[in-house]
Image (cartoon, rainbow, N blue to C red):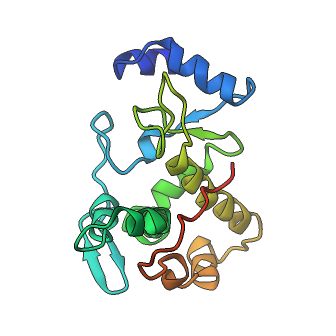
Amino acid sequence: IPAKIVAGALGFDAKGIDKALEDLEGRPYVWATEFENVHTTWDFPEPEITVLGNVYACTELFFHAQKPVPFDESKWFSRRIAAMRVGLRQKFLHSEHSRELLDLLVSSHPHPLRSVKRDCFWGFDPELGGENVLAKLIVEIREEVVGWRAGISESGISDAQQNISVSLLTYLPPVSDAEEEPAPKE
């Protein structure tokens, strides 16, 4: 389906599509909407995830559960990318539907992903542009999986997942006054 038709169905005009293409210097991209944590358009139930023994109904609930209590914006900003990275890794690599999600995600390789929505940090706002951090984190996972699959024998992806598992604590620094982790590069 052409992106401009999808944009129209989601209430956007073609300006957002054109802005995303301009930002990518004309390179084609894949709209990452179906990979997001919150979606009302696609009929896909978000998978339950388990992080450090705790079960969360979905990545978005895990993400919000990582906010410091009482809420402190500077502390949250220093760890929100790490929290999202952990949630996404669990969703794509270790959930009940991870194989299907990974197959769909890998099919988007080598194109950049754009999370076109009205959010300048996690997404790419159709009018203002944005950092597109959510899609960049998903691309990190995709590139890791593409590498695994390139080097996998008949044993399959699950063996590669077990061999390349990274401690979740690496991604979830303790809440501190540290500056926010830089956004991943595209």
Q: What residue appears at the point 75 percent right and 26 percent down from the top-left corner?
A: 25
x and y, in percent, of residue 32 in the image: 50, 40
Q: Picture quarter containing residue 112?
A: top right
Number of marks in the rendered image: 0
Q: Picture quarter containing residue 175?
A: bottom left
Say above or below: 56 vs 121: below
Left or right: residue 74 compared with residue 65: right
Q: Picture quarter containing residue 148?
A: bottom right
x and y, in percent, of residue 140 in the image: 63, 59
Q: What residue appears at the point 56 percent right and 56 percent down from the top-left corner?
A: 137
x and y, in percent, of residue 109 in the image: 67, 46
Depth check, front residue: 42 or 183: 183
Q: What residue appears at the point 67 percent right and 64 percent down from the top-left corner?
A: 144
Q: What residue appears at the point 59 percent right and 21 percent down from the top-left corner?
A: 19
Say above or below: 171 vs 32: below
x and y, in percent, of residue 149 in the image: 69, 64
Whether residue 161 can be seen here: yes
Left or right: residue 70 compared with residue 141: left
Depth check, front residue: 12 or 131: 131
Left or right: residue 181 compared with residue 80: right
Whether residue 104 can be seen here: no
